[in-house]
Image (cartoon, rainbow, N blue to C red):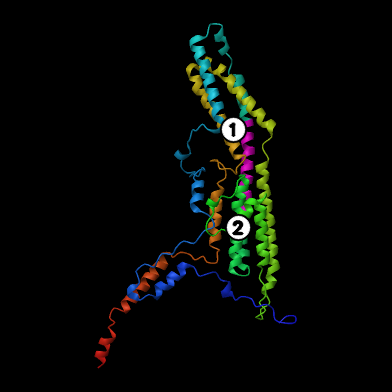
C-alpha cells in the first residue's frame, strides 16, 4: 500500500501476453492425439506474419548488382547505357567520319591534317586520367560514408530490439517497439529516394495508421523516431502494487536513457545520409572534367587515323568507353540511395534487419530442426509400440473371469 489506499489493479502477466500462436496449438493437439493417429512426422508450422512483403523486396533487390567476387565471367560486362550513351556514340561516329574522309576523299593537302603527333594527346590523357581517378575516389568516399551510416542505423535498431524492447512492460509494448523500428527503416528508405511508403511493400504485421502518419510527414524518419520514443516512455517497467516487489521501476530511467542515446546516434546517422543525398559534387570540377574530356576525344582521331587507318575508330571507341564508363559509375555512386544497379541495396539491409527483429518478437518460436523432428518421430513410434498389444475392455473382462 502506498499513500492513502491501494493503487490501481494491474493486469497480470498472463493477460498481457498475446494470443497463443497457431503453430503452438497445433503441436499441443498433435501430442494429445491417440498414438495410432499420430503421424511419423510432426505437423508443419505455419509461417509468422511479417512486417514487410517478402515478394516485393526480393523483386526490388533483383535490380542491384549482387555478385560473387570469386567468379570472373559474371563480372565481365560491356554495356553502354545512361549518360555515357550519346557521348560514346558521338565520339565513335566522329572518328569513323574522319577515317572515311581520310581514306576515300582527302586530297594531298588535306592529308597533312592527320599528321598530328600523338604525344600531346598522351600527355593530356594522363592528366585526364588523374582527374577521373580523383572524381571516382570522391564518389567512392560518399558511397562508403552512406554505407557506414546505414550500418550504424541497423546496429542501433538491433540494440534497441535486443536490449530495450524485451525489458518493457508487456509483450504488446515489445511488439510495438519492434514494429516501429521496421517502420522507421522503411520510411528512411523512401525518404532518401523522395518517395512515399507503398502499401505493397508492407506485411500484415505493420500498423497501417502509423504508415499513413509517416507518409503525411515532412520528415518521416524523424516522425518514426518520435513514435519510438513515446512508445518506450509509456511502456517502461513499473512496480506492481499488488506485490512486495518494488525493484522493476528502477530499471525504467536506465532504459529510457539508453533509448534516447540510441535515437541520438540514429538521428546523427540519418543526418549523414541526408548530407550525402543533398550535396552534389562541385559544379566547376565536373564541368572542367567533362569539357576537356570531350575536347580530348574529339581531337584524338586526328592523331590516330594517320597512324592506324581503319583501326582508329574501334581504338577510339574503346578508349572513349573506358573514360565514359568510369564517369558513369562515378555519377551513380555519388548518390547511392537510388535503385540503380550500383547503388546501395537498401532492400537487402532492411530484409536482414527484419529477420533479426522477427526473432525478438514475443510470439516467435524457432522452427523444428532435424533433432526436434527425430525426437517427435521417436516419441510417436514409442507410443505406437506401447499400445500394440492392448485388447478391448470386453476381452479383458472375459480373461479376468
* Residue lying furthest bottom: 401
* Residue lying furthest right: 3
Residue 169 sits in which quadrant? bottom right
Q: Is residue 151 magenta?
A: yes
The mark found on residue 209 in the picture is: 2
* Residue lying furthest top: 108
Q: Quadrant of the N terminus?
A: bottom right
> In the rendering, at what x and y percent does residue 11 appear?
61, 75
Q: Main secondary structure of the magenta part?
A: helix
The residue indicated by pointer 1 is 327
The mark found on residue 32 in the picture is: none
Residue at the (57%, 34%) spot, across then down? 328
Q: Which residues are magenta?
A: 131-153
Which of 49 and 346 lies nearest the eye of the viewer? 49
Could you tell me if the residues under marks 1 and 2 are in contact, i.e. CB atoms within 8 Å?
A: no
> In the rendering, at what x and y percent does residue 89 appear?
53, 25
Residue 154 seen: no
User: How would you rate the neighbour count of disc 2 (Cα within 10 Å): few for under 14, some for 14-19, many for 20 or more?
Assistant: few
In the image: residue 7, left or right of residue 126: right
> In the rendering, at what x and y percent does residue 170 appear?
60, 70
Q: Please, is residue 277 above or below residue 40 in the view?
A: above
Q: Could you say whether the residue bearing mark 1 is in a helix, strand or loop?
A: helix
User: How would you rate the neighbour count of disc 1 (Cα within 10 Å): few for under 14, some for 14-19, many for 20 or more?
Assistant: many
Q: Could you say whether the residue bearing mark 2 is in a helix, strand or loop?
A: helix
Separation of disc 1 and disc 2 at Cα? 43 Å
Q: Earlier in the sequence, mark 1 or mark 2?
A: 2
Amino acid at each position: 500500500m502506498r499513500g492513502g489506499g491501494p493503487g490501481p489493479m494491474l493486469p497480470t502477466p498472463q493477460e498481457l501476453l498475446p494470443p497463443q500462436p497457431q503453430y503452438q496449438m497445433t503441436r499441443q493437439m498433435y501430442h494429445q492425439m491417440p498414438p495410432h493417429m499420430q503421424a511419423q512426422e510432426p505437423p508443419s508450422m505455419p509461417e509468422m506474419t511479417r512486417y514487410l512483403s517478402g515478394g516485393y523486396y526480393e523483386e526490388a533487390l533483383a535490380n542491384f548488382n549482387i555478385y560473387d567476387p570469386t567468379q570472373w565471367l559474371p563480372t565481365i560486362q560491356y554495356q553502354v547505357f545512361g549518360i555515357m550513351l550519346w557521348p560514346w556514340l558521338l565520339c565513335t561516329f566522329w572518328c569513323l567520319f574522319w577515317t572515311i574522309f581520310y581514306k576515300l576523299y582527302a586530297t594531298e593537302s588535306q592529308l597533312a591534317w592527320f599528321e598530328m603527333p600523338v604525344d600531346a594527346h598522351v600527355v593530356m590523357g594522363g592528366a585526364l586520367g588523374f582527374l577521373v581517378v580523383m572524381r571516382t575516389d570522391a564518389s567512392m568516399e560518399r558511397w562508403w560514408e552512406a554505407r557506414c551510416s546505414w550500418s550504424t542505423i541497423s546496429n542501433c535498431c538491433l540494440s534497441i530490439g535486443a536490449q530495450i524492447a524485451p525489458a518493457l512492460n508487456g509483450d504488446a509494448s515489445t511488439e510495438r517497439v519492434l514494429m516501429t523500428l521496421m517502420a522507421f527503416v522503411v520510411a528512411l528508405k523512401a525518404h532518401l529516394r523522395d518517395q512515399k511508403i507503398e502499401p505493397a511493400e508492407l506485411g500484415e504485421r505493420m500498423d497501417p495508421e502509423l504508415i499513413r502518419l509517416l507518409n503525411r510527414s515532412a520528415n518521416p524518419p524523424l516522425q518514426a523516431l518520435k513514435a519510438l520514443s513515446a512508445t518506450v516512455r509509456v511502456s517502461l517497467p513499473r512496480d506492481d502494487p499488488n506485490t512486495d516487489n518494488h525493484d522493476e521501476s528502477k530499471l525504467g530511467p536506465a532504459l529510457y536513457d539508453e533509448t534516447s542515446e540510441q535515437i541520438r546516434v540514429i538521428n546523427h546517422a540519418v543526418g549523414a545520409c541526408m548530407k550525402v543525398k543533398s550535396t552534389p559534387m562541385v559544379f566547376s570540377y565536373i564541368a572542367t572534367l567533362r569539357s576537356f574530356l570531350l575536347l580530348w576525344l574529339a581531337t584524338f582521331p586526328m592523331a590516330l587515323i594517320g597512324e592506324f587507318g581503319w583501326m582508329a575508330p574501334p581504338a577510339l571507341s574503346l578508349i572513349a568507353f573506358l573514360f565514359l564508363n568510369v564517369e558513369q559509375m562515378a555519377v551513380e555512386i555519388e548518390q547511392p540511395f537510388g535503385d540503380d544497379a550500383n547503388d546501395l541495396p537498401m532492400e537487402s539491409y532492411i530484409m536482414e534487419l527484419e529477420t533479426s527483429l522477427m526473432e525478438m518478437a514475443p510470439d516467435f518460436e524457432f522452427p523444428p530442426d532435424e533433432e526436434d523432428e527425430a525426437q517427435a518421430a521417436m516419441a510417436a513410434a514409442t507410443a505406437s509400440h506401447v499400445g500394440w498389444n492392448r485388447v478391448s475392455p470386453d476381452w479383458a473382462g472375459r480373461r479376468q473371469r
